[in-house]
Image (spheres, rainbow, N blue to C red):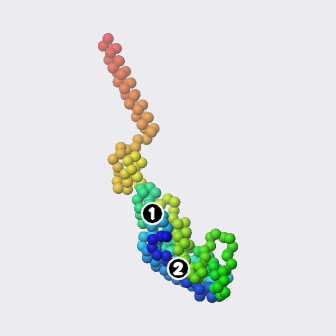
Amino acid sequence: MLKGKVAMIFNVAQLLKASVGTALEENFDEEDVQLDHDLKVCGPITGHVRMRRTNQCILVDGWVELTVELSCTRCLRDFEHVMHVPFEERFYPTVDILTGLAAPVADDEDDIFYIDDHHHLNLTEAIRQNVLLEIPIVTLCQEDCAGLCSRCGYDLNLGPCACPPEVDERFSVLSTLLGNGLTVAQDAQANHKKTTQN
Ligand SMILES: [Zn+2]
Ligand SMILES: [Zn+2]
C-alpha cells in the first residue's frame, strides 16, 4: 500500500439511478495523496471531475493539477514540476443498482475502470495512469540546464569546473605537427651552423 490516504472516491449510487445524460460535477482538493511508488507528489492534488450517466457506464472527464518531484536528466538534481493533466475515462458498474445483481462485465477492453459494489467510483488509479503518461522521458530542471562535466562530474550550472578546456582532436593533431615542425626547423638551423663552422 502507498503511504497517504486513498482519496478521490465518489458515491455514484444516485447517478446510476438517474436517467441517461444526467451529470454530476465535483471539485476536489486532496492533501497527502501519493499516486505511485516511483513518483513523489508534493503538496495537494486539486482537480475537477464531471461524471455523466450513459446507458452502459459513467463517462468521467476532468483535470487534475499537482506538483511532482522529478530528477533532471542532465544534472541529476531533483526539482519540482507543476502539472495540469486532463483525463477522460469510462467506469462500468459491477453491480446493477436496481436489482443488486452482478452487472454483466463490459467488453474485453482493458482501458476501462470499474465502480465497486458499494457504488464508489475511485478516480485514483485513472489519475495515476494519466499523470504517468504526461511525464516526459527527458526531464530538465530548466530548459538550458548545463548538465554535469563529463570528466569530473561537477554541476556546470554552478559555474565552470577546474578541468582544462577540452581540445578539439583536429587542433591537437595540428599542434603536434607544428611542434614537430619547430623541432625540425631548429635542427636544420643547428646543422646549418655546424656546416658553416666547418
Ligand atoms: Zn538540470
Ligand atoms: Zn570538469
The answer to whether 186 is drawn above or below residue 151 in the figure is above
Kind of residue at badge 2? Ile
Residue 9 is labelled as 2
Within 8 Å: ligand 1 and the Cβ of disc 2? no
| Residue ID at (40%, 28%) | 181
Q: Position of residue 13 (x, y in %)?
A: 59, 86
Dot in front, 2 or 1: 2
Is residue 193 left or right of 30 when viewed as pictured? left
Count of residue discs: 2
Is residue 34 left or right of 111 when viewed as pictured? left
Helix, strand or loop under label 1: strand
Residue 118 is labelled as none
Q: Position of residue 96 (x, y in %)?
A: 65, 83
Q: Position of residue 11 (x, y in %)?
A: 55, 84
User: Sequence-wise, which precedes: disc 2 or disc 1?
Assistant: 2
Q: Position of residue 102 (x, y in %)?
A: 66, 80
Residue 70 is labelled as 1
The answer to whether 143 is drawn above or below residue 98 in the figure is above
* Residue 186 position by quadrant: top left
Kind of residue at badge 1? Leu
